[in-house]
Amino acid sequence: MRISALSAASGVSVPTIKYYLREGLLPQGQTTSQTQARYDDDHVARLRLIRALVDVAGLSLAQVRDVVTRLDDPPESWHDVLGIAHGAAVAGPTGVPITHVADARALLADLGWQVDEHTPALAQLQRATEALADAGLDVGPERLAVYARAAHAVAEADLDGLPRTSPAEAGRHVVLGTLLYEPLLLALRRLAHEDVSGARYGRARATPPRRSAR
Amino acid sequence: MRISALSAASGVSVPTIKYYLREGLLPQGQTTSQTQARYDDDHVARLRLIRALVDVAGLSLAQVRDVVTRLDDPPESWHDVLGIAHGAAVAGPTGVPITHVADARALLADLGWQVDEHTPALAQLQRATEALADAGLDVGPERLAVYARAAHAVAEADLDGLPRTSPAEAGRHVVLGTLLYEPLLLALRRLAHEDVSGARYGRARATPPRRSAR
């Protein structure tokens, strides 16, 4: 298909497609003349992936480039496949580096989890607990245990869901699954808040909650 | 304290503090002369909160403003307290609006959860499931059940952890807890991936996984 058809099929505008081509996020099409190229379904799939990573997972274009580069050249061992997803989006929105992860390591040791000491998610955990402490919210052991149990159950289901065809295909699922199931989990948590709150404090309400700032 | 001491206490630079003052994110200090004002511990706490919302929760400054405005004027009923957190960060990174949430509603009906039909998290759920489908990852009923059970357990722990002092104080906890526990949950999920993967596929590895894109 031509670029206009690719745009229609993917819902991504032609200027944006051209930008992704220039930035190397999207592979070049097959050149058919000096000014035209032909694209196929792989391009449609890649564009949908880019938009999902940007719109839903909230990655920057630099992070998207990192993810798709890894997807195009996945590692060959099953355990390393998981690593390719975890490097993405780990620096956080402002890319603040975390240099000490001692507390996070101690916390995982309490849980009995075994992870590589260089794994990027340790820095995420460190940053998350520090931010909670800074805001005056303590992560008590009971609450942490509930979170850890929930996260572990979800992770087991995630690994159960991996295709057993090849590390490359599994890698695609891991990268997309790691990033795209995150918004699902967060949305369900917020909805569960409302369900639990309604059951505890009463749900008699015909209109949405009053929003003082609107 | 003066603005320089406020900067030292909060770790936020003086120009950034002045920017937050101009933007109304931070209340003005008590004026002591034409060019000076005095700040207190509430300003330090507010600055830490703003940084946590930006750096950890990944909110834009406009979203931060919305959250702190709600915090300053919380609703009075316990159930509505939860709503003030759920309006934040719900539009997603690019603010793509979601106009149909029928699938998400059906999904919640299957789970037996009762939520307001206008609740913003329904749009989040809709967007998350659409993105997964677009990427070729189906949310099967088994996986969804695991996610829903995990989210519900976490939500119950979250509500157990709310202070019973006043709706205003609970509101602060709800807003911060909704946003700041999200990175904790996501970090734990990634670490659990690694723990589960190591247990299943072997964790003999002295170095971090090979990163093809680095």
Image (cartoon, coloured by chain):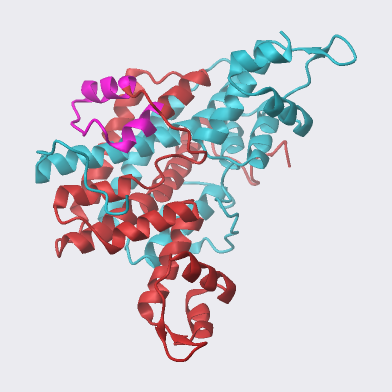
Chain colours: A red, B cyan
Q: Nearer the viewer, residue A52 or A76?
A: A76
Q: How many marks?
A: 0
- Furthest toward the right, the residue is B34
Q: Quadrant of residue B97?
A: bottom right
At a point 78% along the width and 21% down the height, the residue shown is B28
Residue B128 image position (x, y, % from top left): 44, 56
- Left or right, A162 with reference to B75: left
Q: Quadrant of the N terminus of chain A?
A: bottom left
Q: Position of residue A177 (x, y in %)?
A: 32, 54
* Residue shown at the point (51%, 17%) measured from the top left: A136
Picture coordinates of residue A190, whole percent (x, y): 48, 41
Determine the residue positioned at 71% across, 29% down: B20
Instruction: Tell whether position A109 is magenta.
Output: yes
Toward the front, the furthest residue is A34
Q: Main secondary structure of the magenta part?
A: helix
* Residue B105 visible in the snapshot: no
Q: Which residues are magenta?
A: A102-126
Instruction: State the image coordinates of residue A182 (x, y, percent, origin top left).
Output: 39, 47
Residue that extends furthest to the bottom in the rendered view of this protein: A33
Q: Nearer the viewer, residue B113 or A160?
A: A160
Q: Is residue B212 above or below residue B38?
A: below
In this rendering, position of residue A16 left or right of residue B114? right
Q: Is residue A131 magenta?
A: no
Q: Please say if A114 is above or below A64.
A: above
Residue B184 shows in this picture: yes
In the depicted structure, whether residue A187 falls above or below residue B73: below
- Which residue appears at 48% of the width and 31% of the height? B180
